[in-house]
Amino acid sequence: MSVTLNHYLLASGLLFAIGFSGVLLRRNILTIFMCLELMLNAANLSLVAFSRFNLGPDGLPNYNAQILVFFIITVAAAEVAVGLAIIVALYRARQTTHVEDINSLKF
Amino acid sequence: MPAPLAPLTLEIVVLLLGIVLLGFESFSKGGDRGWMARWSVAILSVVFAWSFFTTGDTGVDPSHAFYCADPLALFFKRIALLTTIIVMVISLEFRPVLEKFIPGIQPGSGTGEFFALPVFTCAGLMFMASAVDFLLIFVALELVTISFYVLVAYMRRQNASLEAGVKYLILGALSTGFLVYGITWIFGLTGETNLARITQVLPSLLAEGGRLHGSESALLFALMLLLIALGFKVAAAPLQFWVPDVYQGAPTPVTAFLSVGSKAAGFIVLARVLQTVVFLPSIAPKVLSVLGLLAVLTLLYGNLAALPQDNLKRMLAYSSIGHAGYLLVAFASIDPAAGNLYRTQTAIGFYLFGYLLMTLLSFLVMTVVSRHSRGDDIVHFNGLSKRSPFLAFGMLIAMLSLAGIPFTAGFYGKLLVFSTAIARQNFLLVSVGIITVAAGFYFYLKVVSAMYWKEPTEDQPVTASGLTKFTVAALCTAIFYFGIFPQSLLSMLPSDKAAPVAVSPAPHK
Amino acid sequence: MQDYLPILLQVVVAVVFAVSTLVISVVLGKAARRNAMKDSAYECGMLPMGEAQPRFSVKFYLVAMLFILFDIEVVFMYPWAVVYRDFLVEHGSSIFWSMLGFVAVLTVGYVYAVFKGALDWSK
């Protein structure tokens, strides 16, 4: 059985869904944050798959998508750096990283 | 007259300013950083004036461009610059509070980034105004969002600020995830990331025999992901739940920046993305009905949840959700047969400019008052007219304009928005809009009554710096000027009479 | 087009799969949950000293984070290097200066990190 575009899209859909349900269900901010990164990587995977399987008239993949993936990776790294810094600051102030304990602002 | 400048120079100057500020910050130790804000105000004002001498033509074929500079983009760049300038003035007033919540050996140490980051945010907003490729949209949006993560959580000795930062971080990153996945799907369906080329290829792909014929649902799925992501950014219900907490917890200047800058940039990206699909007969009705639903929900939630609030900052957060609702009315009333979005673009451009004036005015007055009263509940405004008649008058103007009293910019903006809805015979939206305006009168005038008819709890006068007083006066004047002479602003916005610059490079006035 | 319908179905399957996995883990995971009785020492066993997962210093965290940031920026140099020669012939030296500008911006970030003491982990 050859691996087709649909297989990649299925894997990426799974990753996205796992990430999203993790964000909704998990209670530890660090885990939530990892799930968010999983969602970004799901998009990366399907971008590369789309680029590889939709060859242009010259038989080359569409490189726009791969460049977009580079940008997503770098932006995600910046987001993680800032995000972890904020989470560490919160941990220092509150000694917790659980969402239930973040309740000083009323809803 | 000097030769018109390339529009990209504006962003480059703003970015350089940010880099230079960061450089100064890294070499200097402690001390007062107010000069950073004052220099930023001066230089950004120059850039603002400069923006009137730039040409709209980038000389690049729109189907290969990342960046465009049509009148709408230039207008939103001016909104971004003006917002940043006023936010800097607010942060100058906010400095004493900021220093209290920043751990540092000397007073003022560690506050430099608070004045440098808004400059980067401003550059990001300006890029968003011009972005016509999903790549630039994504990068510019993230530049704005990541700077805001830091700014919201900036006061790290205050739990509220940190918690607001974490909430904004999680939900902002979630919306980024949706945005990226939506972009991925759009790319997978069309093979393009450039908005102009997507607009070109979509009709043939969807037509009989095209690759996407009969699979509109895949395109709608991608659009839904994008709408969710942008709905987070512009705070549209039901994606607004982060707004009240984040706005209340964030430092006041950042709240002001978030409520105006982030929202304006979100709406222009929404306009650009919608432009690709809203003229497709098989897609438009569904997208427009979703937008209409969002508009109704946002209007009702924002204006009704604001009624019982007694914290002014939180009330303004709900009010900002409500205003996002009015702006969405203009989007839901797009005419798919018109072939362009000029009517909607003009309405949101004017509305957002008026919203900028009145919201930043109220945040500026609030910062001054809460510094003296040590709190930003409405009670702290009791009897402000006796403690500082001038500031009370400024707040009065801001509240009247937010409520939409005639002869203010807020009124004319609402008029434009409702006229788009009436032109499309969308009377449900108009009636919901009018009901929520009536609700708005109640909570905006609650602040006015506290200032003018309640007795002050303290009697020492509230003082403000000369720059603040000047800004308050300028904003009050502008609210009335653009409310009475809206034409001066409308001439800068795209209209049916003027062709967009991207198509014909001929300049128009 | 019909080709895309399976994809949508697969998305639905993916969602169902992820949700059911999580639900199952919650249902089956009950037995593994800690409680006071489980945490107590067995009969006359020794009382545990300290935590099972001792904390370690996060002083290197900033350095690691900065390393990742600067490391990942190099990704932009690969496509740049691939097209460098062709671009140089066709469009001139602007490709060189634009990369220099990119590196200059990164350098400002690096200088900022150094002078802010972010790399000073002995402090």
Image: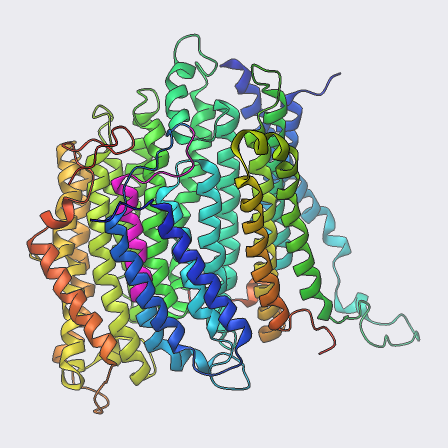
- Residue at x-position 24% and y-position 81%: B464
The answer to which of B341 and B168 lies nearer the viewer is: B341
Decide if residue A19 is on the left or right side of residue B482: right
Question: Image quarter for residue B476?
Answer: bottom left
The answer to whether one can see residue C19 in this image is no
Examine the rendered structure and indicate whether residue B311 appears above or below residue B352. Answer: below
Q: Magenta residues: mostly which secondary structure?
A: helix
The answer to whether one can see residue A44 in this image is yes
- Residue at x-position 37% and y-position 71%: B37
Residue B310 lies in the magenta-colored region: no
Examine the rendered structure and indicate whether residue B92 appears above or below residue B321. Answer: below
Residue B88 rendering spot, x and y as whole percentages: 34, 68
Residue C51 rendering spot, x and y as whole percentages: 80, 72
Residue B163 rendering spot, x and y as whole percentages: 50, 67
Examine the rendered structure and indicate whether residue B224 appears above or below residue B142. Answer: above
Question: Image quarter for residue B132?
Answer: top left
Residue B189 rendering spot, x and y as whole percentages: 49, 23
Decide if residue B160 is on the left or right side of residue B304: right
- Residue at x-position 24% and y-position 33%: B500
Quadrant occupied by the C terminus of chain B: top left
Examine the rendered structure and indicate whether residue B235 appears above or below residue B309. Answer: above
The answer to which of B68 and C60 lies nearer the viewer is: B68
The answer to which of B417 and B290 lies nearer the viewer is: B417
The answer to which of B174 and A80 lies nearer the viewer is: A80
The magenta stretch is B64-87
